[in-house]
Image (tube, rainbow, N blue to C red):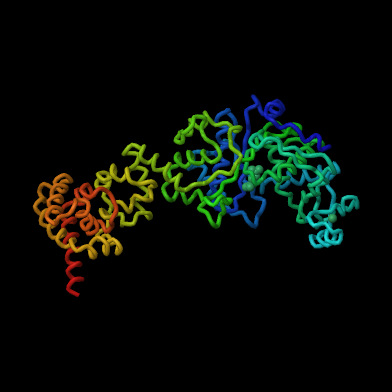
């Protein structure tokens, strides 16, 4: 094999050689389950899913779980359930690398016999010391064992003998042609001293066996891609054949897949998103009450946008129709939580009222609800739902808007109390006069009558309506912001409204007397 063989991998050129029928793309999402499902991974899954959906192709899920120390089964469950939530169930898989070790060992044998690997017994320190003595500043393997013909003993790493010259060309649909000079690639470890295959080797063997036609993944993997290409070509020239995972057993190694490396996601400081610093867990957005379609819509804007300028809200079907891998931008994409929240609010407001009420259920009953289940009143919620729907961006905002209805004694926010009641010398007069006015409305209780009565109360103390509402709202709901006051009071009913106003008045007087 020569580096010159590292060539074309565009779909037009390779599709005829793919094992599956009709040349439909086979894409894969290949996460390593080492933590919460990262938004960047979700974006990668989406772009793969879109390519499969728009072409009658196959979306494969492969769990790259060879690193037993860092992988946990719960992370695998998290990936699968988040993909389901987002409507991106795989067509095939999950395959698991941990179950394919025997296959990797076959490939390692083939590469060894083909002369592509050599054994190396050097430690890091030995390599460093030699580099230092030779005055080489850049760290890297110096080729020491390449011609020593060491035997393949246990405890020795196997390195891949990279070509001395030439370039490995990554033809990337998004980034164009990226050249990697072979001279700057050291003889990398393909099999660790433990006998475990390098990540890129397992990855390539799987892509061959799974008949993958398009490798669509994060840009962080671009530097690994020349190794993948060298390994792929080495296997091909060893006469490596497929194991039948997808397509026939014994088919020759197919041509290289199409590569597409997606732009990285950055935060507002234009820094790469970090698991520690940034809110990146898809699970947490689900728990906050983002809607799956809105979330997918926003993910679609991370590196891509619809052909028509200014269009930012679209369905998964529209995205499937419009998406082109070659239209993906290669510059970093800002993961903007505020914008995503705004997109979600747009979706919330577009829901039918019934759909909204249904979607709210997990926040209204059960462990997420801040009130006991028996305090919840579905009819009261339904009555408030239209005004609540107008005011929330994510569903987890809902309980705070309606808790005054379902908590026996809603706690009063102390800051709100200090500002709107204790700190307002007109508050007492407003409370006294509102209690009187509302008492008179008991038999004709309704938002319009309450509104009219409160206007009279406001005039009586020389206030604008808005100013007069503040102490009433805090007394009744415990907060300074919330749904429109008179709708809220209508649903709450006269007993509780007047009772809470009276309690607030008593508290104010008790504080005054103290
Ligand atoms: N398992 C790799 C990762 O999670 C991705 C491999 C790939 O997509 O080729 O970073
Ligand atoms: Zn060595």
Q: Is residue 211 visible?
A: no
**Residue 393: percent from the left, percent from the top?**
38, 46
**Which residue occupies the foreground of this view, 378 or 242?**
378
* Image spot of residue 351 (x, y percent): 36, 38
Residue ranking furthest to the right? 148
* Vertical position of residue 26 compared to residue 99: above or below: above
Quadrant, the C terminus: bottom left
Q: In this rendering, would 101 be left or right of 426?
A: right
Image location (x, y in percent) of residue 122: 83, 58
Look at 10% across and 57% down and name the residue there: 436
Q: Is residue 476 left or right of residue 178?
A: left
Q: Is residue 319 left or right of residue 407?
A: right
* Residue at the far front in the pictured view: 462
Residue 480: percent from the left, percent from the top? Answer: 28, 56
Up-down: is 139 above or below 161? below
| Closest to the observer, 19 or 490 | 490
Q: Quadrant of ligand 1?
A: top right
Q: Nearer the viewer, residue 153 or 311?
A: 311
Residue 10 quadrant: top right
- Left or right, residue 262 beside residue 358: right
Tell which of 186 and 155 is nearer to you. 186
Q: Is residue 285 visible?
A: yes
Rendered residue at 23%/50% (across/down): 485
Q: Quadrant of the N terminus?
A: top right
Q: Residue at x 85, y 49 (%)?
A: 118
Residue that lies at the very extreme toward the bottom in this rendered image: 514
Corner quadrant of residue 202: top right
């Amino acid at each position: 094999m020569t580096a010159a063989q590292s060539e074309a991998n565009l779909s037009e050129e390779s599709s005829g050689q793919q094992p599956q029928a009709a040349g439909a793309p086979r894409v894969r999402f290949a996460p390593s389950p080492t933590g919460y499902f990262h938004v960047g991974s979700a974006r990668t899954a989406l772009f793969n899913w879109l390519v499969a959906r728009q072409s009658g192709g196959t979306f494969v899920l492969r769990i790259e779980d060879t690193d037993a120390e860092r992988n946990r089964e719960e992370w695998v469950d998290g990936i699968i359930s988040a993909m389901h939530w987002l409507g991106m169930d795989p067509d095939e898989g999950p395959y698991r690398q941990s179950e394919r070790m025997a296959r990797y060992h076959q490939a390692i044998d083939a590469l060894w016999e083909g002369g592509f690997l050599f054994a190396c017994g050097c430690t890091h320190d030995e390599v460093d010391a030699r580099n230092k003595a030779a005055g080489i500043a850049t760290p890297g393997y110096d080729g020491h064992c390449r011609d020593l013909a060491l035997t393949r003993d246990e405890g020795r790493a196997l390195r891949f003998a990279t070509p001395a010259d030439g370039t490995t060309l990554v033809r990337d649909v998004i980034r164009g042609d990226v050249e990697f000079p072979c001279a700057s690639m050291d003889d990398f470890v393909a099999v660790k001293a433990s006998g475990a295959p390098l990540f890129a080797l397992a990855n390539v063997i799987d892509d061959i066996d799974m008949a993958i036609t398009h490798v669509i993944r994060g840009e962080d993997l671009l530097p690994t891609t020349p190794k993948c290409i060298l390994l792929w070509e080495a296997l091909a020239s060893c006469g490596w054949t497929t194991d039948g995972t997808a397509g026939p057993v014994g088919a020759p190694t197919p041509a290289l897949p199409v590569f597409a490396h997606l732009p990285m996601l950055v935060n507002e400081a234009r820094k790469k998103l970090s698991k520690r610093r940034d809110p990146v867990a898809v699970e947490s957005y689900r728990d906050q009450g983002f809607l799956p379609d809105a979330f997918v819509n926003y993910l679609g804007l991370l590196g891509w946008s619809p052909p028509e300028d200014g269009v930012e809200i679209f369905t998964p079907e529209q995205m499937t129709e419009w998406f082109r891998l070659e239209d993906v931008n290669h510059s970093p994409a800002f993961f903007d939580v505020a914008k995503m929240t705004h997109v979600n609010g747009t979706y919330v407001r577009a829901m039918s009222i019934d759909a909204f009420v249904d979607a709210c259920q997990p926040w209204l009953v059960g462990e997420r609800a801040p009130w006991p289940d028996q305090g919840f009143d579905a009819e009261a919620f339904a009555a408030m739902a239209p005004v609540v729907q107008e005011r929330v961006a994510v569903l987890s905002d809902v309980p705070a808007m309606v808790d005054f209805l379902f908590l026996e004694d809603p706690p009063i926010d102390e800051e709100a109390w200090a500002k709107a009641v204790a700190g307002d010398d007109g508050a007492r007069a407003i409370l006294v006069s509102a209690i009187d006015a509302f008492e008179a409305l008991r038999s004709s209780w309704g938002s319009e009558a309450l509104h009219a009565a409160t206007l009279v109360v406001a005039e009586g103390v020389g206030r604008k309506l808005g100013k007069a509402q503040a102490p009433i709202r805090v007394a009744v709901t415990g907060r300074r912001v919330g749904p429109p006051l008179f709708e809220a009071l209508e649903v709450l009913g006269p007993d509780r409204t007047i009772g809470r106003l009276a309690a607030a008045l008593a508290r104010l007087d008790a504080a005054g007397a103290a």
